[in-house]
Amino acid sequence: MYNFCTLFDTNYLSRGVALYRSIENVCKDFHIYIFAFDSTCFNILNKMNLNKATIISLTEFEDDKLLKVKPSRSKAEYCWTSTSSTILYVLKKYNVESCTYLDADLFFYSSPKPIFDELGDKSILITEHRYSPQYDKSKKSGKYCVQFITFKNDEFGLSALKWWRERCIEWCYNRFEDGKFGDQLYLDDWTTRFDGVHVMQNQGGGLAAWNVQQYDFYKKDNSFFCKEKKSGKDFEVIFYHFHYLRFFKNDIIELGRRYLNNDVKNYFYKPYILCLEKIEKEISQIDDKIIGNENLIYSLNWKSPLIFLWRKIRETYNIYNKNEFLKN
């Protein structure tokens, strides 16, 4: 059985449910521990049909060390601070053999089995950003991305996990400072600092806006593949990270500040946005006060009089009218 954990609040509720459903579509034997970071999120999740999930509230999860630093962290920083603690909580309380943390805005297209097969007898699995050269932010954001990280419940796994938790409690902020950034830069030397560390090799995992420029995408026999342009090697798409996808008032969406070709938009973003819309309707039937996307409080002027400037902004930030984007 694959054991996963994730964390999110009401603002990411539809994405978290989409993550769950995507795993359910590709894995027969799994369980996911969802840490609900507000009471509304907790209550709604408990009313949904998530048979292979355990919903954990903040009051169950938070300990004295986390509560002590919570007032000094922003909402996002506290989530980052808590990531390692969620994994440790699952390993300790539920005594599972291993646990893999997943960012809530991941979506699976095929089984993660090839990734776990890679891990073998190693105790820790970490994932590289694999930045495209033009978007390389490894010096400030880290070589590795916390998005998908596995720890076994053994000596090596627990040693690294406890060390990471202590570092994040000491310092975890949304800024680059003294070689640290959030919870990610702590991972940069793990292949030499800790024993039993494996770096994911399968390029079908960890696809994201910062690295898709290196691949061509195609579908064959109901499967979804990426081909690395440099080597010509093919990999089945396992999961995509929808980092920086934002929703605004007036049906405006932003896909982020990186070049995304039409295949990426058609294969990944359009189906994902439609999936979120379907889940948001489901959520609204439980609680019609839930909007579901964290940026809807902001407003963008789609009909700006500065047409030239607006077009440049759209090109840079991948900003679209949602309905037009889905139709084209």
Image (spheres, rainbow, N blue to C red):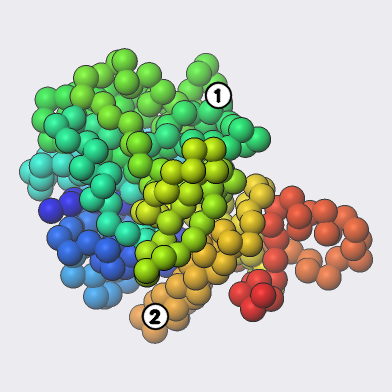
Q: Please tell me which residue is depicted at 10% across the width and 45% down the height of the picture.
A: 96
Query: Relative to residue 26, is residue 122 depicted above or below?
Result: above
Q: Residue at x 42, y 34 (%)?
A: 128
Q: Position of residue 188 (x, y in %)?
A: 41, 23
Residue 177 visible, this orientation: yes
The amino acid at mark 2 is Glu
> How far across and how far down the image is residue 81, in percent?
38, 36
Q: The residue under label 1 is which amino acid type?
A: Lys
Residue 296 figure quarter:
bottom right
Neighbor class of circle 1 (other Cα within 10 Å; few <14, some 14-19, many 20+) is few
Front residue of 248 and 73: 248
Q: Residue furthest left?
A: 95
Q: Where on the picture, by quarter, is residue 101?
A: top left
Q: Which mark is residue 139?
A: 1
Q: Which residue is mark 2?
A: 282
Quarter location, residue 247? bottom right
> Does dot 1 land on a helix, a strand or a loop?
helix
Mark earlier in primary sequence (2, 1): 1
Viewer-proximal residue, 313 or 191? Answer: 191
Name of the residue lying farthest toward the bottom: 285
Residue at 22% in and 36% down = 119
Image position, residue 112 (x, y; %): 27, 52
Residue 41, horizontal then vertical, whole percent: 35, 64
Q: Residue at x 32, y 20 (%)?
A: 191
Residue 268 disc label: none
